[in-house]
Amino acid sequence: MNDETRMNCEQVADRLTDLMEGDLPEQEQEAALSHLATCDRCEAVLADTQSASDLAREHGRVELNDADRERMLGVLLHQVDHNR
Ligand SMILES: [Zn+2]
């Protein structure tokens, strides 16, 4: 992980939706996950985003299927827990 792939809180926040939908390039996904693993503030934002995503999905705005979404959240939460 070099400086080019490091993200700040703002950059991660901008990418949370794409991250959860699996739309990020692999390099950006890894950078975002590594930041989330070490940043309590962004972890809280992620938790809020998960709730928002549930609402959006109920209203048909998120097309990600349940299996993919659960897998993505599992990866995210595992990484956060693993580095605590
Ligand atoms: Zn952060």
Image: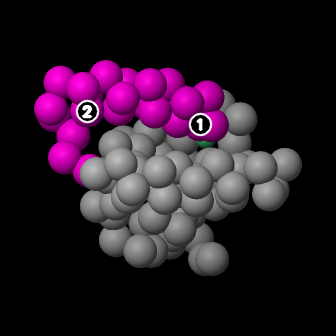
At label 2, the amino acid type is Arg
At label 1, the amino acid type is Cys
Vertical position of residue 34 compared to residue 43: above or below: below
Q: How is the image coloured?
A: one colour
- Whichever of labels 1 and 2 marks the residue nearer the N terminus, that label is 1
**SS for dot 2:** helix
* Region in magenta: 42-64
Nearer to the camera, 25 or 57: 57
Residue 2's x, y, as percent? 61, 77
How many residues crowd around disc 1 within 10 Å: few (fewer than 14), some, or many (20 or more)? many
Residue 78 in the figure: left or right of residue 16: right
The residue labelled by disc 1 is: 42
In the rendered structure, find residue 57 and report the number of the disc placed on it: 2
Residue drawn where x is 39% and y is 56% of the image: 67
Q: Residue furthest left?
A: 60
| Residue 60 painted magenta | yes
On whether ligand 1 comes within 8 Å of the CB at mark 1, the answer is: yes
Residue 24 in the figure: left or right of residue 83: left
Residue 46's x, y, as percent? 53, 36
Q: CA distance from mark 1 to mark 2?
A: 22 Å
